[in-house]
Image (cartoon, grey):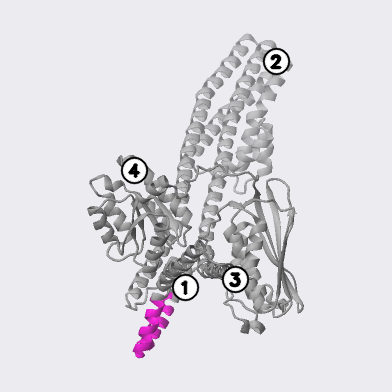
């Protein structure tokens, strides 16, 4: 019954206590084993002590009889005294044995006897304990019996030795008497020899018996330790496994809307988890029941919960394409207009449209980038950056907005800043644009000033600090720690608009650089935001580039370009028109289709030098169309294919190359870059095909 309650108790205690209990049991068994081992060593040492004592006893007996024999011849008193001295050893051992055989053992007398028997003082106590503890063991009883028998025989020599001494002292001992005594001494010696041998043999047998018992006990204890550990580990493992399996099975059933209750095997953490799971299931079942009572609301809530994450992913993926595609057209046609003949006023308007489009593009990217940044998917690209020009351009983008509020918007860049540094110019622009645009938005009158200066220029890294100062209403002290969190705004300025993403994204980007962003000061008279960023140094040397393809419309170049036939596959009519106009303006021969299937059909029937392939199209998308083209059985399978899409991500680029595309250009695209890529691949394809 007690064992049953112990099992119940062990099952219900916390897992940590189970482990502690297991460790305690193992430690206890190990301690028992160590004590057993110590006891064994001491006992074996005591046995060896008795064997040694037997050797001393036997040697003293033989030496004593030898001196007594010599005394019978020599009549020298020294020989007789030597005999008596040697006899103290067996006599002392006998006194010790008799002291231990008493009903109440006299340990003091036994210790004194063994010391008289020339036993080492350190071994006396172990020998006494051995004889006392194992007195009922057969081998010890036999040994003691031989001991008594030998002692009984040896004691016969004592009165004889006294008689011999008296006869020698009287001076009247004859030769016949001498011979009698010598024969008697030899008889005693002869009787003692086999008994001493039996004594040693019996002790040896006892020692071997004890060693075997101790070895068996130690093996048993070792196996007990291992088996106990294994059994407890199995018990704990099974308890955890059964509980977790039940919870997993219950979770799978709940997933199928079958609200089962899992079995609670114990009251430890797993049992508490199972109990909590059952309580959660109860509440979940009640919640589902209540939701089903309101069918329309339940359906909407369920669909919204299941689709929210998918909608978020689809929204982020499609936002880039759907918004940046028309933005590509706006910026593209603006660039085309800038290349046409216009008066100064028209050029100013077009430039304003282009800057506004670029500004809008940056704002759109802010919205799209915030989720990427928080997911840790943004990777910095280190390229040469002109800090002076970047600060100037960023400030100029916001001058129209500042002018509407009659704000003074100025900047200063330290002359100590190197002409070029290695950094991510796009991300730096985002940081500054968010800080400056926030300052302009929340400042109703006064000024906004941007400053950039070097704070450390040692080694291979230059540290630059950027300061954005405004005369706005400031930020309350209690809000300053949260101002860099997403969707956080200052309540008293909520009417000024914004969704609170700018500073949060700036903070993430600064952290990505390994820099620091903070509020230096913020009062009712204005704020001073600071950003400290590291940049690698870059020598101001012209990059070694391949000779650019000439875009001059020489007769030979014009004929060469006119001979290049380009197939464009894009389902967006604005993009079709933009790409066609950009390429036709450079005298390329262009054909346009609206989906990937038409592109494959066109390429089957006609010859082209290069294909510009959008990715998201009906019928066949860009990936599928490229795969189909690469499976052609003729030289057309090697035609250069350039992806042109608003999905400008590393994953998309990798997928493009994986399906067989040769290059990638992102929307909005640079017309000159596109021209360079077309000429490079067209020439390579012409060399390979022999055209």
Which mark is first along the chain, 1 or 2?
Answer: 2
Residue carrying label 4:
686
Q: Residue 33 or 172: which is nearer the viewer?
A: 33
Cα separation, mark 3 vs mark 2, equals 127 Å
Q: Which residue occupies 22% across, 54% down?
A: 605
Magenta run includes residue 295: yes
Tell me the SS state at disc 2: helix
Cα separation, mark 3 vs mark 4, equals 49 Å
Magenta residues: mostly which secondary structure?
helix
Which mark is first along the chain, 2 or 3?
Answer: 2
- Is 341 on the left-hand or right-hand side of 157? left
Any mark on residue 272, and which? 1
User: Of tags 3 and 4, which is closer to the observer?
Assistant: 4
Magenta run includes residue 641: no
User: Of tags 3 and 2, which is closer to the observer?
Assistant: 3
* Badge 1 vs badge 4, beta-carbon distance below 8 Å: no
Any mark on residue 540, and which? none
Cα separation, mark 1 vs mark 3, equals 45 Å
Q: Which residue occupies 63% across, 41% down?
A: 99
Task: Estimate how packed mark 1 is, as few (under 14), some (14 to 19) or many (20 or more) residues with alpha carbons within 10 Å.
Answer: some
Tell me the SS state at disc 3: helix
Residue carrying label 2:
168
* Badge 2 vs badge 4, beta-carbon distance below 8 Å: no
């Amino acid at each position: 019954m007690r064992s049953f309650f112990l099992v119940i108790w062990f099952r219900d205690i916390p897992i940590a206590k189970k482990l502690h209990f297991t460790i305690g049991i193992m430690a206890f068994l190990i301690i028992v084993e160590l004590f057993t081992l110590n006891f064994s060593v001491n006992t074996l040492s005591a046995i060896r002590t008795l064997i040694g004592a037997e050797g001393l006893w036997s040697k003293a007996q033989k030496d004593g009889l030898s001196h007594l024999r010599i005394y019978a011849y020599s009549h020298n008193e020294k020989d007789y005294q030597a005999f008596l001295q040697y006899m103290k050893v067996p006599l002392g051992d006998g006194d010790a044995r008799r002291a231990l055989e008493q009903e109440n053992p006299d340990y003091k007398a036994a210790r004194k006897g063994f010391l008289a028997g020339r036993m080492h003082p350190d071994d006396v106590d172990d020998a006494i304990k051995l004889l006392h503890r194992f007195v009922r063991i057969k081998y010890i009883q036999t040994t003691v019996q031989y001991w008594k028998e030998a002692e009984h025989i040896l004691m016969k020599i004592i009165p004889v030795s006294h008689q011999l001494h008296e006869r020698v002292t009287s001076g009247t001992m004859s030769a016949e008497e001498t011979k009698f005594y010598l024969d008697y001494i030899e008889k005693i010696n002869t009787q003692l020899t086999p008994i001493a041998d039996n004594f040693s043999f019996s002790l040896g047998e006892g020692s071997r018996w004890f060693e075997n018992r101790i070895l068996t006990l130690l093996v048993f204890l070792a196996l007990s330790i291992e088996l106990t550990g294994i059994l407890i580990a199995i018990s704990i493992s099974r308890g955890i496994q059964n509980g977790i399996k039940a919870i997993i099975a219950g979770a799978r059933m709940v997933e199928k809307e079958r609200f089962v209750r899992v079995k609670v095997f114990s009251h430890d953490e797993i049992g508490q988890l199972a109990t909590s799971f059952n309580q959660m299931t109860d509440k979940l079942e009640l919640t589902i029941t209540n939701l089903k009572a309101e069918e329309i609301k339940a359906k909407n809530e369920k669909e919204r919960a299941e689709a929210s994450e998918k909608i978020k992913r689809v929204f982020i993926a499609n936002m880039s394409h759907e918004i940046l595609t028309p933005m590509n057209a706006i910026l593209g046609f603006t660039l085309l207009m800038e290349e046409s003949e216009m008066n100064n006023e028209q050029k100013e308007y077009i430039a304003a449209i282009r800057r506004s489009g670029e500004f809008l593009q940056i704002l759109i990217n802010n919205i799209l980038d915030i989720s990427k940044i928080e997911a840790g998917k943004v990777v910095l690209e280190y390229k040469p950056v002109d800090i002076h020009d970047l600060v100037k351009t960023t400030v100029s983008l916001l001058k129209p907005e500042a002018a509407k509020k009659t704000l003074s918007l100025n900047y200063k860049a330290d002359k100590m800043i190197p002409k070029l540094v290695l950094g991510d110019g796009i991300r730096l622009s985002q940081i500054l644009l968010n800080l400056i645009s926030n300052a302009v938005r929340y400042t109703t009158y006064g000024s906004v000033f941007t400053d950039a200066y070097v704070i450390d220029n040692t080694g291979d890294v230059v540290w630059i600090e950027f300061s954005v100062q405004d005369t706005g209403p400031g930020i309350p002290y209690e809000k300053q720690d949260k101002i860099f969190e997403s969707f956080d705004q200052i309540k008293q300025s909520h009417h000024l608009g914004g969704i609170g993403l700018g500073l949060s994204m700036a903070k993430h980007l600064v952290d990505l650089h390994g820099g620091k962003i903070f509020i230096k000061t913020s009062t009712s008279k204005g704020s001073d935001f600071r950003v400290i960023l590291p940049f690698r140094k870059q020598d101001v040397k012209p990059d070694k580039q391949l000779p650019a393809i000439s875009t001059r419309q020489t007769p030979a170049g014009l004929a060469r370009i006119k001979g290049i036939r380009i197939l464009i596959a894009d389902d967006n009519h604005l993009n079709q028109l933009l790409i066609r106009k950009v390429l036709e303006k450079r005298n390329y021969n262009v054909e346009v289709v609206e989906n990937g299937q038409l592109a494959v059909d066109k390429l089957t029937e006609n010859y082209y030098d290069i294909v510009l392939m959008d990715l998201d199209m009906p019928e066949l998308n860009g990936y599928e169309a490229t795969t189909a083209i690469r499976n052609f059985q003729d030289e057309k399978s090697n035609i250069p294919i350039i992806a042109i899409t608003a999905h400008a991500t590393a994953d998309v680029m990798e997928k493009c190359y994986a399906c067989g595309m040769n290059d990638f250009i992102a929307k909005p695209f640079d017309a000159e870059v596109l021209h360079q890529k077309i000429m490079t691949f067209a020439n390579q394809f012409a060399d390979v095909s022999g055209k």
